[in-house]
Image (tube, rainbow, N blue to C red):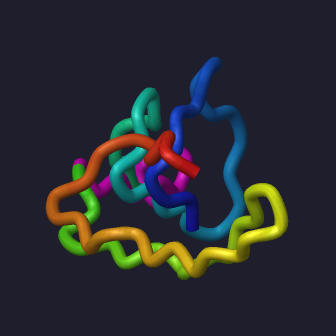
Amino acid sequence: MTRNTHLGRGWNGGNWNMVFSGCTNAPATQCAAHGGKPYTNVAASPVIAEKPYISENNGRWTLNIPRVEHNKVGPTNNF
């Protein structure tokens, strides 16, 4: 399972069913039973809620709670 990332040079290989959700440059969906690799590609992740994280700036600690995103494609670059 690969979610919301940019696959710079695409994807090569497969094992069982490779699932891509909201990934740019991911392979198209195809069925291994028909001579292809076992890929499932969901164009956009319907809802994403990233994990909260803690940051420190000059001795001050902050809890950061990323916003819920809908129909997300690609990575979030504000971490």
User: Which residue does the image show at 54% across and 80% down from the upper left?
Assistant: 51
Q: Position of residue 9 (x, y in %)?
A: 64, 18
Reply yes or no: does residue 37 show up in magenta: yes
Q: Is residue 72 left or right of residue 77?
A: left
Residue range highlighted in magenta: 32-43
Q: For residue 15, which quarter of the picture? A: bottom right
The vertical placement of 10 against 38, above or below, is above
Q: Is residue 7 left or right of residue 22?
A: right
Q: Position of residue 16 (x, y in %)?
A: 64, 69
User: Which residue does the image show at 62% across and 75% down from the upper left?
Assistant: 62
User: Which residue does the image show at 52% across and 44% down from the upper left?
Assistant: 5
The vertical placement of 33 against 29, above or below, is below
Which of 70/56 is in front? 56
Q: Quadrant of the N terminus?
A: bottom right
Which of 28/2 is in front? 2
Which of 52/40 is in front? 52
